[in-house]
C-alpha cells in the first residue's frame, strides 16, 4: 500500500496522537493485522453472503490476486490550520479531529491487513477543515476525482458541500459516519453505511408485528417535533407490515399521566409501548410512570436507538420494563476477532480503539476487498452481506439515492445489560 501525505495530523489534547504524523511520512505500510472476514467473489448473478473468518488465520484470496492498485481518497475534518494557530483547537474542533484520526487509523489498519494478502492501495488524505467552501473546492481536485473510492466527508453539511446539486463527482462516495437520510443529498453515487433512522423504525415495526404479534401499540409522544422523525416511518411500516391489523394509539404524555390509556390496556396480554423521545426530562418522568403501570399490567417498551447512550436511564428500570432498542452498532468484546483487533490497535497506535476506529476498520476491510476485485463490485453491494466487528452490512440500492445499509439489530435489556435478540 502506498500512503500519500497531504497534511500533518493534529495533536489531541487528551491523547498522545501526534506520533501519527510518522505514519504519514512512511511510504511503506505499518505491520499488519489480519482481516476478520474475507469476501468471496460473486458467482454469476447470485447473491454472495460473506462468512467471517478467524482473525488469526485469515483466508487467502482464491486464485491469483489482481496486481492493480486501488486509489482511495479520504476526506476528514482534521482542522490542521488550527494546529499552529494562536487560538488552537476548541473543544468541538478537537473532538472532530480525534474522530478523524481514530477513523483513519482503523481504516489504515484494515488496508495494511489486506496488503499483507497481496492487494495494493494508494490512500490519500485530505483535510476538509470542516469548512463548506473549502470542502466544495476539494471536488475539483484531480487526485480525488480520479480515485476509485472517496471516503467522506463525515458530516452531512460536508457531504452537501462536496457533492453539490447536481452531483459534480461521478465516483462512489462513502458516507462513513452520518446516519442522515440519503434523501438529504440526492446523490446516486452515495454509499450510506450507518442505517438512517427510518430503518430502525422499520425493524422495530417488523419485530412488534411479526415476533411479538402485538394487537395494539401505544406510542407515547413528548410533544416535540423531533419525535416525528421516528413515529412517522414507524406508523407507515407497522400499517404495511401488520396489514393495518395492528392498532396504533398515540398519546401526548403530559407530566407522565397515562390514565387516558387505562381503559385500553390488557391485564393478560403484553402491552407494547413505543417511546420515540430522546428528551431527558420527558423520559425520566414517563419511564417512572410506566414502571408504576407495570405493577398491574404486562409492559414491554420499545425505545429510541440513542437510549443506550443515556446514563440517566438505569439498567434495573430498563430491565423491569422489558425495554427493547434497535441498534446499528454493537461490538462483542468477547469475540476472538475483536480481541485480536484491540491487541493490534494497541500495538500499532499505543491507544485504545474508539467506536470510530472500529468503524474505520470495518469499512476498510469491506470496501478494500471489493475494490481489489476486477468485477467492479462497488456496483453490486447487494451481493455482499458482511458481518463485521462493529456492525453488519446489508446494502439496498435506492433509485437516485445510492446504496443504503439496512442492517439493524434488536437488543433487549436482560441481566442488567443489552443482549441481542435479533
Image (cartoon, grey):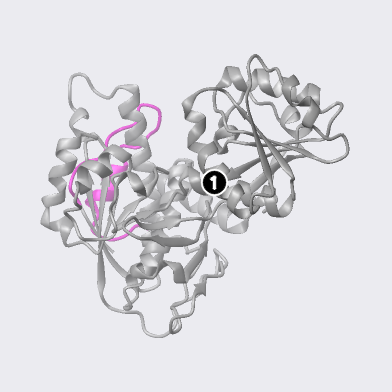
Q: Is residue 81 magenta?
A: no
The residue closer to the viewer here, 166 or 310, is 166
**What is the quadrant of the N terminus in the image?**
bottom left
Question: Is 302 above or below relative to 347?
Answer: above
The residue under label 1 is 236
Image quadrant where residue 215 sits: top right
Report the side of 132 relative to 155 (left or right): left
Question: Is 154 above or below relative to 366?
Answer: above
Image quadrant where residue 70 sits: bottom left
Q: In the rendered image, is residue 413 in sight?
A: yes
Image quadrant where residue 250 sits: top right
Q: In the rendered image, is residue 328 in sight?
A: no
The residue closer to the viewer here, 362 or 325, is 325
Q: Residue at x 60, y 35 (%)?
A: 308
Highlighted magenta segment, given as a residue range: 5-30
Q: Position of residue 125 (x, y in %)?
A: 23, 50
Kindly state the secondary structure of the residue where label 1 is placed. helix
Q: Residue at x 63, y 16 (%)?
A: 254
Report the side of 414 relative to 274 (left or right): right
Q: Is residue 19 magenta?
A: yes
Q: Which residue is drawn at 48% across and 53% down?
A: 344
Q: Where is residue 364 in the image (x, y as percent from the top left)?
A: 39, 58
Q: Main secondary structure of the magenta part?
A: loop
Amino acid at each position: 500500500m502506498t500512503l500519500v501525505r497531504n497534511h500533518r495530523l493534529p495533536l489531541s489534547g487528551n491523547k498522545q496522537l501526534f506520533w501519527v504524523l510518522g505514519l504519514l511520512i512512511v511510504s511503506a505500510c505499518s505491520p499488519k493485522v489480519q482481516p476478520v472476514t474475507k469476501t468471496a467473489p460473486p458467482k454469476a448473478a447470485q447473491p454472495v453472503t460473506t462468512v467471517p473468518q478467524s482473525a488469526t488465520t485469515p483466508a487467502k484470496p482464491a486464485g491469483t490476486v489482481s496486481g492493480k492498485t486501488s486509489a482511495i481518497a479520504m476526506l476528514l475534518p482534521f482542522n490542521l490550520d488550527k494546529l499552529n494557530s494562536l487560538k488552537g483547537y476548541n473543544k468541538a474542533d478537537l473532538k472532530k479531529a480525534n474522530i478523524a484520526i481514530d477513523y483513519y487509523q482503523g481504516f489504515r489498519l484494515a488496508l495494511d491487513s489486506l496488503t499483507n494478502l497481496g492487494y495494493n492501495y494508494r490512500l490519500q488524505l485530505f483535510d476538509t477543515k470542516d469548512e463548506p467552501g473549502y470542502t466544495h473546492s476539494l471536488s475539483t481536485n484531480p487526485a480525488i476525482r480520479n480515485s476509485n473510492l472517496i471516503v467522506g466527508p463525515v458530516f452531512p453539511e460536508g457531504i452537501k458541500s462536496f457533492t453539490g446539486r447536481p452531483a459534480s463527482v461521478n465516483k462512489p462516495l462513502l458516507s462513513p459516519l452520518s446516519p442522515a437520510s440519503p434523501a438529504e443529498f440526492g446523490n446516486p453515487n452515495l454509499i450510506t453505511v450507518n442505517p438512517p433512522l427510518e430503518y430502525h423504525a422499520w425493524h422495530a415495526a417488523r419485530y412488534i408485528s411479526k415476533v411479538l404479534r402485538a394487537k395494539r401499540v401505544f406510542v407515547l409522544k413528548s410533544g416535540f417535533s423531533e419525535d416525528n422523525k421516528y413515529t412517522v416511518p414507524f406508523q407507515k411500516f407497522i400499517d404495511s407490515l401488520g396489514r393495518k391489523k395492528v392498532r396504533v394509539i398515540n398519546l401526548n404524555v403530559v407530566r407522565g399521566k397515562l390514565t387516558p390509556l387505562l381503559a385500553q390496556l390488557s391485564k393478560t396480554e403484553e402491552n407494547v409501548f413505543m417511546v420515540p423521545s430522546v428528551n431527558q426530562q420527558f423520559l425520566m418522568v414517563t419511564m417512572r410512570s410506566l414502571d408504576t403501570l407495570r405493577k398491574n399490567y404486562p409492559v414491554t417498551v420499545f425505545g429510541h436507538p440513542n437510549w443506550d447512550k443515556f446514563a440517566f436511564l438505569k439498567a434495573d428500570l430498563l430491565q423491569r420494563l422489558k425495554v427493547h432498542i434497535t441498534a446499528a452498532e454493537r461490538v462483542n468484546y468477547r469475540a476472538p476477532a475483536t480481541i485480536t483487533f484491540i491487541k493490534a490497535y494497541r500495538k500499532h497506535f499505543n491507544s485504545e480503539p474508539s467506536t470510530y476506529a472500529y468503524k474505520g476498520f470495518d469499512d476498510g476491510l469491506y470496501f478494500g476487498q471489493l475494490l481489489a476485485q476486477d468485477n467492479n463490485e462497488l456496483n453490486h453491494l447487494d451481493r455482499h452481506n458482511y458481518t463485521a466487528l462493529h456492525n453488519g452490512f446489508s446494502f439496498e440500492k435506492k433509485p437516485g439515492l445510492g446504496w443504503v445499509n439496512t442492517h439493524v439489530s434488536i437488543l433487549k435489556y436482560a441481566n442488567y445489560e443489552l443482549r441481542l435478540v435479533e
